[in-house]
Image: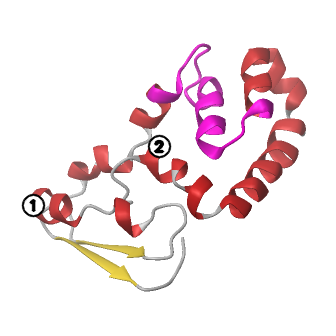
Amino acid sequence: ICPAWDVGSAFGAMSEAQPAAERAMLAQIRSRFVRRNERLLRAYDSAAVDACLAAQSLSDLLAAHAPFAMRRRGATGDEYFAAHDPMAVRRNVSVPVLVLNAEDDFVCPASLARPDVIVREQPGALLLNTKSGSH
């Protein structure tokens, strides 16, 4: 369970909080995944490859890669974020859970943690925010 209430917002916050980390991640994803698999990806959806390569943020990249992740040409970023939102499936967890979130987490910043929702709606869950620990 990730305490990010909105996965799209979590990745969207990176451009402001950690711009250098975001640029590094974008470069690595482009070179180590998109470029290495470009022929195969283009055979499936060339427009999505172009969108991935043109993405200027992680949010843009995640939205652009939706056709691959969702295994459906034309899939949108909104569909991807809805299908991969960990808070949407947390109610299926029926064992006690300790949810950790660090204040310096650049992917899921503490500002996006929703202790009120977790405590109220997730029986047996405890959210622990730490000063450091990153992602």
The residue that mark 1 highlights is 120
Among all residues in the image, which is located at the extreme bottom? 131
Membership of 54 in magenta stretch: yes
Residue at image coords 72%, 39%: 56
Q: Amino acid at mark 2?
A: Gly
Residue at image coords 49%, 31%: 80
Residue at image coords 53%, 61%: 107
Segment tinted magenta in the rendering: 53-78
Residue 38 in sight = yes
Q: Amino acid at mark 1?
A: Arg
Q: Earlier in the sequence, mark 1 or mark 2?
A: 2
* Comparing labels 1 and 2, the label whose residue is closer to the camera: 2
Q: Quadrant of the N terminus?
A: bottom left
Quarter of the rendering containing residue 62: top right
Q: How many marks?
A: 2
Residue at image coords 75%, 54%: 23
Query: With 66 as the anchor, is 23 left or right in this view?
Result: right
Mark 1 and mark 2: span between their CA atoms?
Answer: 23 Å
Q: Position of residue 34 (x, y in %)?
A: 82, 37
Among all residues in the image, which is located at the extreme front? 16
Q: Position of residue 16 (x, y in %)?
A: 58, 57
Which element type, helix, strand or loop, lies under badge 1? helix
Which element type, helix, strand or loop, lies under badge 2? helix
Q: Position of residue 37 (x, y in %)?
A: 85, 34
